[in-house]
Image (tube, coloured by chain):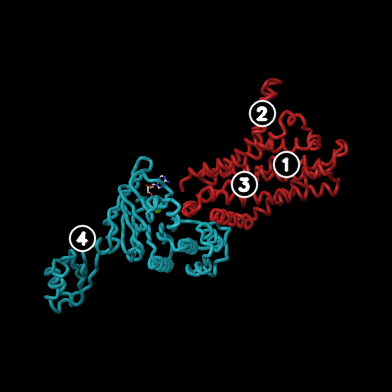
Chain colours: A red, B cyan
Amino acid sequence: MSAVQRIRAVARAEAAVLRRNRWLAVATLIMVVFAVALSLAGSAPTGTLGVDMLTVSVASMTTLAVYLIPLLALLISFDAVAGEADRGALGLLLSYPASRAEILLGKAVAHVAALSVACVVGFGVAGGLAVALGGAGADSLWALARLMGTSVLLGAVFVGLGYVLSSLAGSSAAAAGLSAALWLVFVVLYDLALLAAVVLDGDGGFTRSAFPWVMTANPADAFRLWNIAGSDTVAVAAGMTGAADALPRWAAPASLILWPSVAFWLARAAFRRVEP
Amino acid sequence: MTPLLCHDVFKRRSGTAVLDAVSLAVAPGARVALLGHNGAGKSTLIKAVLGLTGIDGGTIAVCGDAPGSGPARRAVAYLPEAVAFQGALTGREVLALFAGLAGERRADLGALLDRVGLAAAADRRIATYSKGMRQRLGLAQVLLGRPRLALLDEPTSGLDPVSRHDLYAIIDDLAAAGTAVLIASHALTELEARTDRIAILRQGRMVADDTLDALARAAGLPIVLRVRAAETGAADRIAAETGGARINGTSIEIRCAAEGKMRALHRLSGLGPAVADIDIAPPGLEDLYRHFSGGMS
Ligand SMILES: Nc1ncnc2c1ncn2[C@@H]1O[C@H](COP(=O)(O)OP(=O)(O)O)[C@@H](O)[C@H]1O
Ligand SMILES: [Mg+2]
């Protein structure tokens, strides 16, 4: 019981910080602005594909989320350990009867909750707008809900990875640099490297058997695959039916559901090695 | 159970010993000043007691428990050197965080903030606090839940004299309620001297651990008698009689060991009305500290 109390104490303080320094408001605003802009911009070809506007909107927002959510998650988390160390407050925090896992969990609760608010509000407003302008069906509403849910999972992954870097970096500045590098690797370079491998391999063994699995192992790609393969209409709208078909349906969800635990486990291991 | 027992503690950092055979005991209600120059190993010793850093030899027991263990963490309170709190939070919010971590659900935060003089600033952001106010907030979290052992690392550095006295008044109360208090400091001031015992670290070695009086005796530093002669002519005679040195027209300074003090006074009283006044100055704190901690700075 007291572990819960300690986690709640940390979460409450972190949540107050996020509210007070406007992080929550700014992140939510960013999500709303980008989501609305993208779903309106993507609405032009609706008629030709024969799908409702919300479907197109979700496909556009999925592409946006792959870039934006890891970025916001890293921005919120990179300072979690390094910042305390820089302030000289880490030793004090660790002198209390709270385990390192409890401290990280408390921070994660607040950070993931803040990201969830930003995602749900941002996608909700844009989705609502799409529904008002172009209608929606049960399938596309379900796709919107899945986008929100998977966004929270994707955010949790990168919050955890941000803690790993924050623990390893030793200073806030170094943690910020490492976070930028991590974002680049997961969101941009990984896909580029895969693309290069596929081009070099032609129609060889890698392209046919290994490629889809290697792709799903990246949480950002798993997020994309889950959202797109999960709905035929979204896949049509995104023009991305082929890649998803090669995998069993559970692969992408399994990857995205496992990743937050993996990231958190790594974060705990890294934090344990920090000597204040 | 003794709140703090360190025996033969040894710690190496990148090849050199930063703690070398350090032994220290702090009893309930005792206030011990841990003195030493910067880099002497004070913070390292405190971190070792908290279990934040490991040791390479010897033993440390906090109320009989291993450093960093659950029971040990519940028994200690810590005020880090130069701590800064999250500036976006208010003093009350930070204290609520620590109360939650300590499992002190019923702690009266308002009363604690009042005790350290932060009642008026309790709901202001910490970013607006002065250095002294932050230090007070740090002290408020030390007072949470009646710790058995309080470890204060340079609690008065950067504080004005009034704040220092306030801080020591709170420390005295804490000790009076039975908490063992260890105060690290890089100087020996009147406030540290008012502690019950003084332990001095010098390059990782404990070179002194005793009461101020005993340390003064052990150091054998001279007592200075300042004598004022009744008239100019008498000054030279007094200096000659007592082996002192004339420092201006009518003043003579006599340096003698503590044991020689009475003999010097007898001789002075024998000089009758030639002596107008006598002032006895025991060795200064500065002299004493310098003697044990080994020159420099
Ligand atoms: N994190 C660290 N890594 C390596 N050396 C350190 C570290 N912290 C302190 N030291 C070294 O250990 C010695 C003791 O430092 P410290 O305990 O901070 O001294 P004090 O608190 O008495 O000023 C110094 O020589 C210092 O350079
Ligand atoms: Mg120090």
Give the mark nearest the N terminus, 3 or 2.
Answer: 3
Relative horizontal placement of residue B119, taking residue A52 as reference (left or right): left
Q: Quadrant of the C terminus of chain B?
A: bottom left
Residue at 21% x, 67% y: name it: B224
Distance Cα–Cα, label 1 vs label 3: 17 Å
Amino acid type at image mark 2: Leu
Residue receiving disc 1: A64
Chain under numbered label 4? B
Give the mark nearest the N terminus, 1 or 3.
Answer: 1
Q: Are marks 1 and 3 in contact (CB under 8 Å)?
A: no
Looking at the picture, does residue A228 appear above or below residue B45?
A: above
Distance Cα–Cα, label 4 vs label 2: 78 Å
Residue at 17% x, 64% y: name it: B256
Residue receiving disc 3: A75
Chain under numbered label 2? A
For ligand 1, tell me if the residue under mark 1 lies within 8 Å. Answer: no
From the top left corner, tell me how far across and down residue B167 is, in percent.
42, 66
Element type at marker 3?
helix
Distance Cα–Cα, label 3 vs label 4: 61 Å
From the top left corner, tell me how far across and down residue A200 is, in percent.
67, 22
Residue receiving disc 4: B220
Amino acid type at image mark 1: Leu
Chain under numbered label 1? A
Element type at marker 2?
helix
From the top left corner, tell me how far across and down residue B170 is, in percent.
42, 67
